[in-house]
Image (spheres, rainbow, N blue to C red):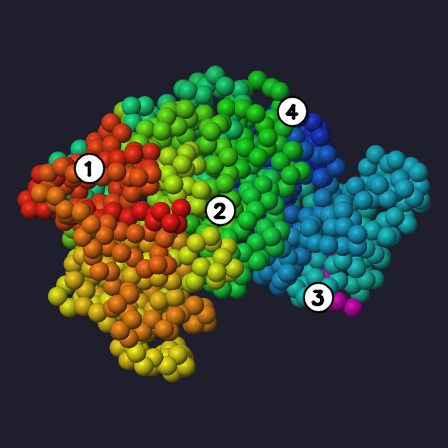
Amino acid sequence: MGTGKKIAIDIGGSHVSACIVDTTRPGAAPGTIITRSLQAGGSAADIISTIAGCITAFKDTATDGIGIAMPGPFDYQQGISAITKVGGKFGRLFGLHVRQALQDAAGTGDQPVHFNNDAHCFAIGARHILGLSGEKAILLTLGTGFGSAFLENGELSKGPAGLASAAFYDCPFQDGLADDYFSTRWLLNTFQQQTGVMAPSVKAMAEQYETIARPVFHAFGGNLGAFLRPWLSQYGCTELVIGGNIARAYTLFSGPLEEQLSDLPVKITYCQDTERCILAGAAMAPALPEPAELRRTSQPLLPVSITNNSEDTYTVFPSFHTDHPVQAGYASLAAAIKEDNLLIIDGYEGVLWEQFRTALHQALLSHNRTVYWYHAGACLQTPAAIHSMLEGYSGTPDPVFGKRFDGSLADFFDAEKLSLIQPENTAGLHIIYGTGAALTGIKGKLLYVDVPKNEVQYRLRAGSVTNIGTPTYTYKRCYFADWPVLNKHKQSLLPHIDMIIDGQRPDTITWMEGDQLRASLDVMLTQPFRARPWFEAGVWGGDWMKKHLPGLNPNEVNYAWSFELITPENGLVLEGSGNLLEVTFDMLAFHDNHRLLGKAAPRFGTAFPIRFDFLDTFNGGNLSIQCHPRPEYTLQHFGEDFTQDETYYILDCGPDAEVYLGFQEDIQPAAFRGALEAAINEGTPLPVEKYVQQFTANKHDLFLIPNGTVHASGKNNLVLEISSTPYIFTFKMYDWLRTDLNGRPRPIHLDRAFDNLYFDRKGATVPDTLISKPQLQEEWPSGKKWQLPTHPEHFYTVDRYEFSGEMHIPTNGQCHICMLVEGHQLDVTAGGGTQRFQYAETFVIPAGADSYTCHYEGEGKAMLVVAYVKDNYC
């Protein structure tokens, strides 16, 4: 059972105070307060040592934890300093993980250490010690900086509307920010400018130079009143409490302050015991909450080690064997870096940085290394600045669509702050870590932590990670801003990575040497391989995949999609020494897009052009009536270089399965729109068949859906969607009056759809031009090759091979994307490697393979679908 006592620490600009506070009696006088002089402009090691000394002074007292009041800006959740521009004070702490440094220096063991804003601590302590009774109180700490806190009915609040950071310090005032005017440095600088006297402190101004200092204090009070007046009025403030060192000179500035506020119903209190209030509040302030969950999904994590699957069936965790070792666990990584003095650990969005850092730190302690951690996140632009920068991209009003941001990851960071991370030349291991850590320009061994896109989304949904530089997330921000800049950043780092780390498992890692990663990619660019698929539920989803694909969670409500090969979101799993490490698919293109794409590389660069995915409506529902944007619309509105041209290959279907495709001959666009608007506004069901044609779906049919074509899959289909890679640009027109899995209306995009629809794709034109007519191209004793022609708008084509025994296929300088659509399993050999692929598994033959041989020994004929870019589009 706890003691109720905590060590409370107040870190100020000139000294550190500490005492024991009995939190069961918050209004009681604290125990003995000790004070240590602090050189806030000194080295990080000296500052940490001073604070740690205050902790160890109470080591013989049984306590439940340590509460620390710290001026901002500061990451109070993680314990990381972000303080800059405060007269040089605490500058050497910038980016430092202060909590970890203190825990190590003071040897706190398992005792929790919690940080809170000093002004918030003042408010919490003052509530009990001063007996605040007002409904709405504003509390200020005037000292090294301009601290502020807000209470509503005794509880901390965010204060008046319009405060970007829930504080006053960064609000505009006159020619700068409020912190520039209501702090010690303004008083001292202004006093020197007006009198020529350099006072050592505000106390000296008030006591030794009172007469000549009065005009400066008078201006200070008038400015403070002018600044506070609109905020107090807006907030409905009933009590104003002013504390901090400057408050001791209140008799010199209170007159003009109170004159400015004289007509407001505000009680003003000047606190002369700020330190006691802060210490009491530091002990009593609750620890900031941790995320309730790390990932929100029913899907399993990639296992650390390969599992022997005795069945030759579809696998949800395919891997590519490499002769290079994949290491597992933080202990092995710590052993590999224990002799280093400086490391850069960069990584993708979605890394659980604090869990990663804590685990690696503990592993390094076993090697008796002193480790200092510096977080690159302290260098980010403010959330408001990032929001302004992205306003025309991911910040548009449309909840789904934005425009691809064309900047870089460096644009999210403050260049001046990046230069402030300066590990000191002291013994120990100094680690600069976090997304963008390499942007500091500091040279050291480079480690990179990768996280698959599906896992990023699971963590975003759980709230355990956020978009870059903001406290919230949207998938839209990821797609249009975060991922494009992070991909560029990863590409620039790939040749220089010394160690690659798979950070998708919260409790452990796998990793391998960077040069061995690049060597493994070299081999992969000559051999067959699979991407790791992942699966998503949807309101129209079915149960075909649950019944046919082992390894899926059978309790999932349904599965709508399988991301078989949607390369912006798929990963590649390397298996070495029995352990599994996943990297993103785009690393192949970043490493050598010419060997991956061949003749298509000049056209598509590092963007992989073709995607394969499943749409499962077996015992499910119809997809929405929809279309996709025309190329020029896609470029203008979304910044995408090519559009979403699709085909539906019917892998399996029920006897009643249908596909909606193209308009009826008598389509009237205005009438169609009117019926759609009635569905949206009045809930009137749309008679879909009146406007859109329906076609019976049969196994191995290929329906062509170039941009601007109205379409939808009906229920009881398992569609293999062979498409161009863009994958979120679906304009829904009618969604059968249903909500999503969370009960919310699904977005409808009538204006966008009607800007892109081709109404001349109607009547007999549809079966003539939008249903592929297989053409026999080649025949031999054990097989045939059919071409399944696509629409002229499609930049890719589809072949289907029907064969038994062995068959040889040249790539002709193209990357081939393949799937076994009939038959049990297939052995494929290329580049000296042989891989076995099962029914319904998607695999890739890179252009660097030149050719590949397929061997089938099952019953009957195998059927292999192959898609690749048309030569005239290269």
Q: Which residue is mark 1?
A: 808
Q: Earlier in the sequence, mark 2 or mark 3?
A: 3
Number of other residues with Cα within 10 Å of mark 2, as a class: few under 14, some 14 to 19, many 20 or more: some
Q: Nearer the viewer, mark 1 or mark 4?
A: 1
Q: Earlier in the sequence, mark 1 or mark 2?
A: 2
Number of other residues with Cα within 10 Å of mark 1, as a class: few under 14, some 14 to 19, many 20 or more: few
Query: Is residue 581 depicted above or below 150 in this figure?
Result: above
Q: Residue at x 25, y 68 (%)?
A: 767
**Disc 3 secondary structure class:** helix
Kind of residue at badge 1: His
Q: Which residues are magenta?
A: 263-268
Q: Nearer the viewer, mark 1 or mark 3?
A: 1
Check if mark 1's residue and mark 3's residue have beta carbons within 8 Å: no
Return the mark for residue 484.
2
Q: Which residue is mark 3?
A: 233
**Can you give x and y, in whole percent of width and height, for residue 194 in the image?**
92, 44
Q: Nearer the viewer, mark 1 or mark 2?
A: 1
Q: Which residue is mark 4?
A: 46
**Disc 1 secondary structure class:** strand
Q: Earlier in the sequence, mark 4 or mark 3?
A: 4
